[in-house]
Image: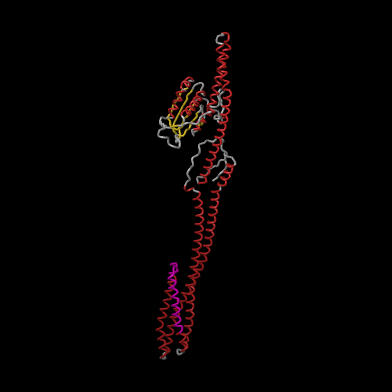
Amino acid sequence: MPENFAPRPPFASSRSTPPSSTKPGSSVRIRVVSGLAVIIVAFAGLTLYSITLHRSTVDDIGLINSSYLPLTLGTAEIRSTQLVFNTLLDRLADNPNQSVTREWIDAARRFRPATLRRLRAIVDKTLEKDIPDEEAAFISEMGRRLVEVERRYLANESKFQELYGLMSTGKNDEARHHIEGLKRVERLLDRVLEGVRVEVETHITELAEAAQSEGERANLGLAILTGATFLVAVLVIVSTNRLLGPLKTLQLAVARVARGEVNTHLTVGSDDEIGALARGFNRMTDALAERDQMLIRSERLATAGKMAAQVTHEIRNPLSSLGLNVELLEDELTELPEASEAKDLLRAMQDEIERLTGITESYLRFARLPVPNPRFDDIGAVVKAALAFMETEIGEADVHICDLIDEDIGPVYFDTNQIRQALVNLIRNAREAMPEGGVLTVTAHAVDDAVEVSVADTGPGVSAEHLGQIFDSFFSTKSSGTGLGLPLVRQICLAHGGDVRYETDGEAGARFVISLPRQRDTEPPENEDTQ
């Protein structure tokens, strides 16, 4: 979220931007936890993949060691015995009465079935394991062939008994013919065993090559997955750092505010908690700046009030004495017709004394504005009463009144006399802004939890260079103005918890809007008038 300090106009609006709710999907906590979860899942996947590959390799090696190598070695042993067995048969054919040769043949006859049974046990034990289907099919086929060899061995036992019978009766020719038949069977079984050995060795080679190829693929896969996991981790770290980076900016902004730079402002670029915190910070600085402006205005008003009260006190009594003396002089000159010029001077003096007296009265009203005594009342009726009071003055100035007062505003909590005084000041200013006549538009309507009363004229409006000063004490663009009318209106509105603002649409005319809260924090007592 890009955040930076931005200057704010010194007279920012007191209307704060309402806090926006944080979207659930953009929560900082959710985003940070999600990032950590992604890293954990990625590393868990990497670990699981590594374990799976390791188990596959271990299973293949275990199958070779526990099954295929013993089968290869066992068939090789039987074939070795088979070669010796064939040699012994040849010797027996040359001399059927060799007892030692017959003992060796009998030993070989006992060794071969025992070895085959051991190999078959290996096959059965392997089939009981959880091995791939293709491996189970292969080793089942090898076991079937071993069973067939063993069956042939058992079938040859009767032929050996028959051979020994022929040899014991001296039928050597028939015995040799019988030996040749046994040798043919033995050669056939030897080819079968050789086929088993070769296929098992070939299968071992294929498994080894497949394991090597799988290992290479596994290494490549692990490298890719490790790189992807590392990249995800880096992205999560960068994203988290970027997400939490604005906290440093906020910290610097808080430090600037602590040094008194209340005009510090943050640019909000996200809708998460940090964005909400930045918006809250902006609202806080707006409130602090507005408070400072209010304090400055209050100090100025207090100072101006004290000065006005002091000046009024100093000149009020002399003005009264001057006025009384002017009246006495005018009475004495009444009987002197030749003193007409002196009478004119006295009347001019009297007019000026009355004007100065009016100014001093304005200063006193400004300096001694009492605390509002609000109650629930009908503000529409108060607006109409102010217009009725000013109707004669407005009519003489050839100004037409446009009354746009909402009848359904409801009760509003305010001091009737003070708000009426503020409205009279605004109406009089609007009338004086239209010396050639015009239209005076007065509106009153409810806006959310507030009520707005506006006074608009069709005069020249306020120039841009004076906009920042129109509510300052003693500032006036009129030669005969005291500069206390609008400050008094603003002081009354602020005392009611409201405000007054100037609006323009860029065309001729001025529009002043009084905004007052509809009601106070607590309900009015039952005996209070709630018109």
Q: In the rendered image, which quarter is residue 375 located in?
A: top left
Residue 115 belongs to magenta span: yes
Q: Between 96 and 286, which is closer to the camera in this rendering?
A: 286
User: In the current view of this chain or complex, which residue is farthest to the top?
Assistant: 337
Quarter location, residue 155: bottom left
Q: Position of residue 231 (x, y in %)?
A: 54, 55
Residue 288's place in the image compared with 128, above or below, is above
What secondary structure is the magenta-colored segment mainly? helix
| Position of 2 relative to 124 (above/below) | above
The percent position of residue 63, horizontal first and vertical second, equals 48, 70
Please give the range of residues in magenta: 107-136
Q: Is residue 176 above or below residue 72?
A: below
Where, quadrant-wise, is the C terminus in this rendering? top left
Horizontal side of residue 319 vs 525, given as left or right: right
**In the rendering, at what x and y percent does residue 164 appear?**
42, 87
Q: Nearer the viewer, residue 95 or 73?
A: 73
Report whether 474 appears left or right of 160: right
The residue shown at (58%, 12%) is: 342
Residue in the picture at 49% in, 77% down:
76
Q: Nearer the viewer, residue 385 or 227?
A: 385
